[in-house]
Image: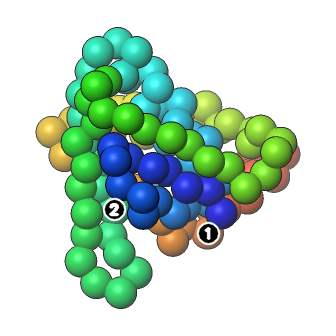
Amino acid sequence: MGHLYYGGSFEPIDMSDRLLAHVKVVIATKLRRGESFTVSWRHPEQGRSTIWLHPAIELRFVFASPEPEMLDSALLQRFANEAATAAGLVLDLSDASLSSPVPEGR
């Protein structure tokens, strides 16, 4: 399980290492360009959260595995496209397909 620490919060946003790896690339790319945007997700019990990502706000990505995840270029493109919309990037933290790599040939 990976963790995204946002701003001065000591409470992380928990997600699979695979999802976090893709989110990290999209966030880093957009912030490197000076583009701010929102990221939203639903809580398992109820409710939802949205954070505003801006280059001046501290972020830290912590991965459980020492090995880097294999990245899916189609998923990166989908996330980048979503991040560019008014709704921002909306994550499904419970998506089982993002908890392990997509098998070869898919």
Q: Nearer the viewer, mark 2 or mark 1?
A: 2
- Is mark 2 in CB contact (under 8 Å) with mark 1? no
Residue 49 horizontal/vertical position (percent): 25, 63
Residue 59 horizontal/vertical position (percent): 43, 38
Where is 20 relative to 81, above or below? below
Residue 13 horizontal/vertical position (percent): 45, 60
User: Alpha carbon of mark 2 to alpha carbon of mark 1: how far?
Assistant: 15 Å
Residue at (51% x, 63% y) in the render: 14
The residue lying furthest to the left in this view is 86
Q: Residue 50 is drawn in which quadrant?
A: bottom left
The amino acid beneath tag 2 is: Trp
Residue at numbered disc 1: 96
The amino acid beneath tag 1 is: Ala
Question: Is there any visible trace of residue 98 in the rendered image?
Answer: no
Where is 16 relative to 83, above or below? below
* Image quarter hosting the N terminus: bottom right
Q: Which mark is residue 33?
A: none
Which of the two residues, 44 or 3, is positioned nearer the viewer here? 3
Q: Rate crowding at label 2 as few (under 14), some (14 to 19) or many (20 or more) other CA atoms within 10 Å.
A: some
> At numbered mark 1, what does the secondary structure look like: helix, strand or loop?
helix
In the figure, is residue 8 to the left or right of 68? left
